[in-house]
């Protein structure tokens, strides 16, 4: 299909499997990649099977990594601005097919339409960023203490980069890693979530189009591995993959981090988040209400940056909470493909069961639960739709310190900013955070070294909705990795320091002397 085509099915289509086939056929993806495998893929919208993918064996994974390594050996020699041209073409393909790929995200991951489109826009944005970066992979030149010497630092491609992504951002997280890794001179092997492999295969088909237009990209430069966890484990354990970027739970990251470290590889971990917002007494409550609603309810609470804890100052608690409860009671829950829907389904039954367990634990800890529970939806009997839950907690106890991937917001009172910061930082995770205040001192304290201990600290906005220009990631059990913008590109490269002697003497550093007798090697005796 030529550039500019967007294979959307006719409006009003209700057969999700047929709609998926139309989109993937339009992308040129062979049917054997998504219609003849042993692993079923279900849409969270209604639980129907929308495709089947093959489970790759360990031998097939090893072969794919071998092909990627060979591609890297060629790609690293291509000038970085030329590598940026491939990513520019990928961005063009994504722009031309944004509507179809975004709709596929909504079908496979359950996101509302605007969020599915927004995810693809994020991919386009990181491609734009990476193209510019391809001319800015700067090193350093340092002053040498030795005469007639130059000291410099360079960055070289690391090798094959493994990307393990989660279901909640099935394509954007790959692009954060892949667009940067490619311009840095690496090959990419992608293991998507078992729950969302079709969007990965669709993205790979668009990459293949871009590579064909590029003309001389090596085979295997970008590869998708479908299958169970064992396929991801084979990727994690392979010494030909020096960098592994893994997004998922803290439990998953603990395993991945240790296995990569055992072979002295480098892990970029983006793991659990238990994000809090502080509502200070000077906060603009209208602004805070909108931000809290999106942060806690958007994506059905299934973002790693979703708002999970709300700390409200005593003086504004009784004014703010009733308004928030009214929002929770009235928010539109429904089929994510329908206009007007704000909350789509949870990804599957186990996610709903985890939400129920967390709410039971909150009640046992003295919490008052508003909302929650499964909501039946006509035509979507196999989907797990829930009412978002607002839980007033007497303290930060029970399930509050745990991340539950569902729309649960725990609300607590606080008195002083010091108390709020202690609560904010008093959980094992450290991804994102925010404060709503019009007090400059409070805002600066929150973003200071003595404030939030998270990788992201926002003021007068919620914890979610990060832009690609900044490095994304968190601290503590969030893993410490950084992806996307700023100087996160350095994680996909190896650093090399070089000292160059352009003189005719051999001075040593630190004043060391090592004088040897001067003689002619090989002279006649």
Image (cartoon, rainbow, N blue to C red):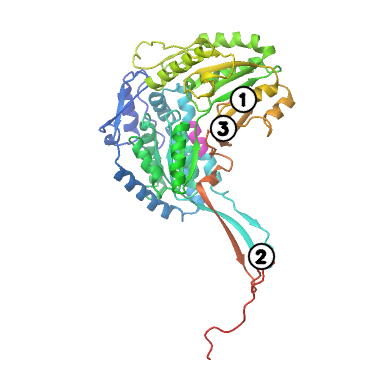
Query: Measuring 71% from the left and 21% from the top, which residue is drawn there?
Result: 438
Tell me residue 136's x, y (percent).
58, 48
Query: Measuring 69% from the left and 17% from the top, which residue is drawn there?
Result: 415
Q: Which residue is mark 3?
A: 467
Q: Give the magenta range.
A: 120-126
From the viewer's perspective, is residue 99 above or below residue 258? above
Q: Which residue is mark 2?
A: 509
Count neighbours of disc 3 (C-alpha within 10 A) and say few if under 14, some if 14 to 19, many if 20 or more. few
Q: Please name whichever residue, 237 or 49, is drawn nearer the observer in this view of the structure.
A: 237
Identify the element where label 3 is drawn.
Answer: loop
Identify the element where label 1 is drawn.
Answer: helix
Whether residue 12 is visible here, answered yes or no, is: yes
Whether residue 340 is visible here, answered yes or no, is: no
Q: Residue furthest bottom?
A: 525
Q: Which secondary structure is most common in the magenta stretch?
A: helix
Q: CA distance from mark 1 to mark 2?
A: 48 Å
* Left or right of 359, for residue 230: left
* Left or right of 28, for residue 296: right
Q: Are marks 2 and 3 in contact (CB under 8 Å)?
A: no
Q: Earlier in the sequence, mark 1 or mark 3?
A: 1
From the viewer's perspective, is residue 139 above or below residue 423? below
Q: Which residue is mark 1?
A: 424
Residue 155 lies within the magenta run: no
Tell me residue 219's x, y (percent).
36, 49
Q: CA distance from mark 2 to mark 3?
A: 45 Å
The number of numbered discs placed on residues in the rendered structure image is 3
Q: Earlier in the sequence, mark 2 or mark 3?
A: 3
């Amino acid at each position: 299909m030529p550039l500019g085509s967007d294979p959307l099915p006719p409006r009003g289509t209700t057969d999700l499997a047929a709609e998926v086939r139309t989109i993937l056929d339009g992308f040129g993806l062979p049917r054997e990649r998504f219609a003849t495998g042993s692993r079923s893929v279900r849409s969270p919208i209604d639980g129907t099977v929308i495709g089947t993918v093959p489970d790759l064996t360990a031998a097939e994974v090893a072969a794919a990594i071998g092909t990627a390594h060979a591609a890297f050996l060629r790609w690293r020699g291509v000038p970085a601005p030329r590598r940026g041209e491939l990513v520019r073409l990928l961005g063009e393909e994504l722009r031309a097919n944004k509507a179809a790929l975004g709709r596929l995200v909504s079908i496979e991951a359950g996101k509302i339409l605007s969020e599915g489109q927004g995810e693809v826009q994020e991919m386009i944005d990181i491609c734009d960023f990476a193209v510019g970066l391809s001319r800015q992979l700067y090193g350093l030149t340092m002053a040498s203490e030795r005469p007639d010497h130059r000291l410099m630092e360079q960055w070289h491609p690391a090798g094959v980069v493994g990307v393990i992504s989660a279901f909640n951002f099935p394509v954007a997280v790959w692009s954060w890693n892949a667009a940067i890794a490619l311009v840095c001179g690496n090959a990419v092997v992608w293991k998507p979530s078992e729950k969302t492999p079709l969007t990965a295969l669709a993205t790979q088909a668009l990459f293949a189009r871009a590579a064909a237009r590029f003309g001389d990209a090596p085979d295997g430069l970008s590869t998708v591995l479908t299958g169970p966890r064992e396929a991801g484990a084979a990727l994690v354990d392979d010494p030909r993959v020096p960098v592994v970027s893994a997004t998922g739970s803290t439990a998953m990251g603990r395993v991945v981090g240790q296995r990569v470290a055992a072979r002295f590889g480098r892990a970029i971990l983006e793991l659990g988040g238990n994000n809090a917002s502080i509502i200070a007494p000077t906060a603009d409550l209208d602004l805070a209400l909108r931000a809290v609603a999106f942060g806690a309810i958007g994506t059905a609470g299934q973002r790693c940056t979703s708002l999970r804890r709300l700390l409200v100052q005593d003086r504004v608690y009784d004014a703010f909470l009733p308004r928030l409860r009214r929002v929770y009671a009235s928010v539109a829950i429904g089929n994510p493909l329908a206009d007007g829907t704000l909350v789509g389904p949870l990804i599957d039954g186990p996610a709903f069961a985890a939400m129920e367990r967390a709410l039971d634990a909150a009640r046992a800890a003295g919490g008052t639960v508003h909302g929650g529970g499964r909501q039946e939806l006509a035509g979507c009997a196999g989907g797990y739709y829930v009412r978002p839950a607002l839980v007033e907690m007497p303290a930060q106890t029970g399930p509050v310190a745990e991340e539950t991937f569902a729309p649960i917001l725990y609300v607590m009172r606080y008195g002083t900013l010091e108390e709020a910061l202690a609560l904010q930082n008093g959980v094992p995770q450290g991804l994102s955070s925010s404060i709503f205040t019009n007090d400059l001192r409070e805002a600066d304290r929150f973003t200071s070294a003595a404030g939030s201990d998270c990788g992201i600290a926002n003021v007068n906005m919620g914890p979610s909705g990060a832009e690609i220009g900044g490095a994304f990631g968190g601290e503590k059990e969030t893993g410490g990795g950084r992806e996307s913008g700023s100087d996160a590109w350095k994680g996909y490269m190896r650093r090399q320091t070089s000292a160059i002697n352009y003189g005719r003497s051999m001075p040593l550093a630190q004043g060391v002397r090592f004088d040897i007798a001067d003689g002619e090697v090989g002279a006649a005796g």
